[in-house]
């Protein structure tokens, strides 16, 4: 089961005390106070939600990071999570695999990523698509009206971000190396490079807010989506 949480920044608690020293150091690196506040709200919320899942105090949780910066929860290899934020909202996805079932023996095949994108009217979508979208995706946008093209651009963008976050390499993976479906179904087709084709990828399109696009990507037998 994938638990999906969506919150406004205004509804999140500002709690500096449960942050680790490295999180406080990162907080202090923000130039603008609003960005620092948003960072603290995101990280403290993440800690509280994960605390409820594993039964450990929020301030005792420790994170490890791969070379691309994707975090994992130390001591809990069965816990998958991903966090995303855009403008006024924060998105969190959490899943727990079940090794005892025998379906999750190959840990490297299990993955989870999420993304939320505010449909910023200032973005030049065609120019941006030329830089980072696949040929199929660029062609699909050019066949649409301006209004539909803008909606589809951010839908595609959120799906691509969710995939690269699940895959674990982030933006270095190359957004133009794979193609996501442009339809509005709940489950979206995805065509990935050969090195990732063996993993059973599922891409979900969620219609949760006006003016935002939300996507969840998973690999492996994680289960259904549940909005919390």
Image (spheres, rainbow, N blue to C red):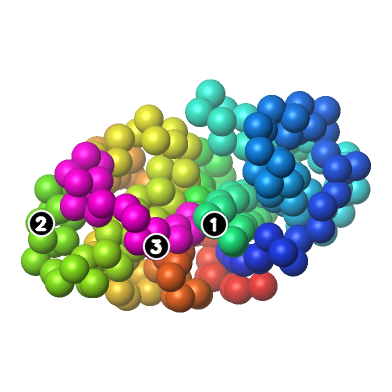
Mark 1 and mark 3 in contact (Cβ < 8 Å)? Answer: no
Write down the residue under mark 1: 87
- Answer with left or right where residue 145 lies relative to residue 219: left
Residue 201: quadrant of the picture: bottom left
Question: Mark 3 — residue?
Answer: 119
Local secondary structure at mark 2: helix
Q: Which residues are magenta?
A: 115-133
Residue under the image location 50 percent in, 75 percent down: 208
Q: Quadrant of residue 97?
A: bottom right
Q: How far across and down, in percent of the image, does residue 169 sit?
A: 44, 33
Q: Earlier in the sequence, mark 3 or mark 1?
A: 1
Q: Nearer the viewer, mark 2 or mark 3?
A: 3
Q: Secondary structure at mark 3?
A: loop
The answer to whether any part of residue 175 appears in the image is: yes
Quadrant of the snapshot with the C terminus: bottom right
Q: Residue at x 35, y 61 (%)?
A: 121
Point out the tag, 2 or 3, that comes first from the N-terminus: 3
Q: Residue beneath label 2, please?
A: 139
């Amino acid at each position: 089961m994938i638990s999906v949480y969506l919150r406004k920044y205004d509804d999140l608690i500002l709690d500096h005390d449960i942050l680790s020293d490295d999180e406080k150091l990162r907080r202090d690196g923000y130039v603008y106070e609003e960005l620092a506040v948003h960072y603290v709200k995101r990280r403290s919320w993440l800690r509280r939600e994960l605390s409820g899942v594993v039964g450990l105090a929020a301030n005792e949780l420790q994170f490890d990071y791969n070379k691309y910066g994707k975090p994992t929860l130390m001591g809990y290899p069965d816990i998958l999570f991903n966090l995303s934020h855009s403008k006024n909202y924060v998105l969190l996805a959490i899943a727990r695999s079940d090794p005892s079932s025998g379906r999750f023996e190959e840990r490297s095949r299990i993955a989870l990523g999420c993304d939320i994108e505010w449909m910023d009217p200032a973005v030049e979508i065609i120019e941006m698509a030329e830089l980072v979208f696949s040929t199929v995706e660029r062609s699909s946008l050019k066949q649409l009206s301006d209004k539909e093209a803008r909606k589809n651009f951010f839908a595609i963008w959120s799906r691509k971000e969710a995939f690269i976050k699940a895959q674990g390499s982030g933006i270095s993976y190359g957004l133009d190396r794979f193609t996501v479906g442009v339809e509005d179904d709940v489950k979206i087709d995805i065509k990935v490079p050969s090195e990732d084709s063996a993993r059973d990828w599922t891409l979900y399109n969620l219609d949760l807010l006006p003016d935002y696009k939300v996507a969840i990507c998973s690999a492996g037998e994680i289960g259904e989506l549940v909005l919390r």
